[in-house]
Image: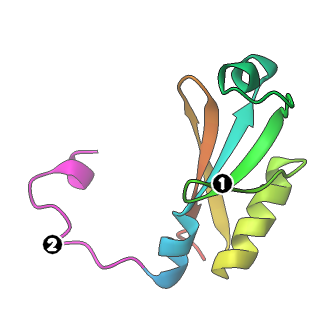
Amino acid sequence: MIARFGRQGRAGRPSPTEAEREASRYTVVLVSPEAAEALGDDRGEVGLHLFRDDDWDHQPAHLDDAAKMIEEACGEPIILTEHHSDLTCWTAHVREDA
């Protein structure tokens, strides 16, 4: 983490590739029934939601489906990194061994 957020910033790191930029635009969010209610979703749409930037893009049935959609969009194999806050979500990153 120190290397990422140190004062040298991005100067020592290469610019992201087009695939890396595209993958970083995606977030998969797990919406629980309670979260759907809190979000004001009167339709009660729960489950996985795929967002590109801040726009809803798709409702994949499984994380594997979400990963395949993101891989098709960026043209590279990706990994999903899980995060927990008030909602569980995953961010996409190009696999380093790709």
Q: Position of residue 48 (x, y in %)?
A: 79, 42
Q: In the visual, does 79 lie left or right of 47?
A: left
Q: Which residue is mark 1?
A: 51
- Kindly tell me whether residue 76 is visible in this rendering: no
14 in magenta: yes
- Toward which corner of the image does residue 66 lie, by quadrant? bottom right
In the picture, residue 94 is in which quadrant?
A: bottom right
**Element class at badge 2:** loop
Crowding at dot 1, Cα within 10 Å, few <14 / some 14-19 / many 20+, comes out as: some
The residue singled out by tag 2 in the image is 11
Whether the residues at callouts 1 and 2 have beta carbons within 8 Å, the answer is no
Quadrant including the N terminus: top left
Q: Is residue 29 magenta?
A: no
**Left or right for 60, reference 5:** right
Chief secondary structure of the magenta portion: loop
Instruction: Report the residue at 57% width, 67% height from top.
Output: 23
Instruction: Give the label on residue 10, or none.
Output: none
Q: Which residues are magenta?
A: 1-16
Identity of the residue furthest to the top in this view: 34
Identify the amino acid type marked 1: Phe
